[in-house]
Amino acid sequence: MLTRATEQAPESVAHAVYLSALMPASDVPAFAYARMPENAGALAQSCVRADPAAIGALRLDLASGDAAYRRQLLDAFYGDVDPAVAEAAVGLLTPDAPIGIALGTTTLTRGGWGSVPRTYITCARDMAVRPALQKKLISDATVAFPDNPTAVAALDSSHSPFLSMPGQVADLVAELG
C-alpha cells in the first residue's frame, strides 16, 4: 500500500519506511512474494484458512481453539513478543484481510516512487517475511532505481518489533527525520 501511495503522490511522502514489509517491484503483485523461494520457511502463508482467490480475502482463524494453529499464528507474527502482548495483538487483527490490493500491481517510475528516499528495516528473525525475501526486496528496488538506493537498518527481531522493541523502532524512525 505504501508503494502504491508513494507512486501516486510522491510529494506527500518525505521518506518511505518499510518495516519488514512487502515492497513490491514494478508490476509485481505483493501477493506473489509469499510463494517466492526467498520466502521459504515462512509461517504466515500456512496460517491462511481458505483459498484467498475464492473468498477475496486472507482469512485467519483468530478464534481457533487448535493449540498448534494458535502457536503457529503467534510464531509467524509475534515470535519475540511478550505472550500477553502477542495475544492482545491477535485480538486486534481482522480475520479477513481484503486481498484485492495485494493482487494489484503498480508501475513504478523515477518521478514517482523512485524519487522518494526510502529505508527498509530488516527483521532478522521474521517468520512472515523471511530475511532472504527482505534482501530481495531491497536489492530489486536498488537495481530498479540505482540513483536512489534503498537505505537499510536492521533489527534482531520477529515480524513485530513495534511490539517487542518499540523504543528501538521509534529511535530508528526518528533518526530518519
Image (cartoon, rainbow, N blue to C red):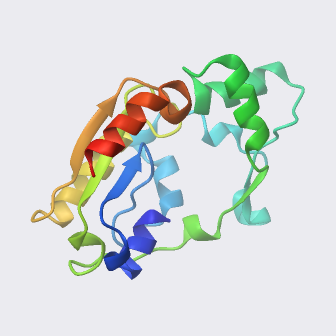
> Which residue: 44% across, 48% down?
36
Q: Percent position (x, y) of residue 85?
A: 68, 25
Residue 87 horizontal side relative to residue 30, left or right? right
- From where the camera sits, is residue 159 visible? no
- From where the camera sits, is residue 49 visible? yes
Residue 16 horizontal side relative to residue 35, left or right? left
> Which residue: 19% across, 57% down?
142
Depth order, front residue of 36/44: 44
Depth order, front residue of 53/138: 138
Depth order, front residue of 4/170: 170
Residue 126 horizontal side relative to residue 48, left or right? left
Q: Is residue 141 above or below residue 170?
A: below
Residue 148 horizontal side relative to residue 104, left or right? left
Q: Percent position (x, y) of residue 46?
A: 66, 38
* Count of numbered marks: 0
Q: Is residue 11 above or below residue 120?
A: below
Q: Is residue 99 above or below residue 128?
A: below
State which quadrant residue 163 falls in.
top right
> Which residue: 32% across, 38% down?
172
> Which residue: 39% across, 51% down?
18
Q: Percent position (x, y) of residue 148?
A: 15, 63
Q: Percent position (x, y) of residue 74?
A: 67, 27
Depth order, front residue of 169/159: 169
Q: Is residue 166 above or below residue 51?
A: above
State which quadrant residue 125 falls in.
top left
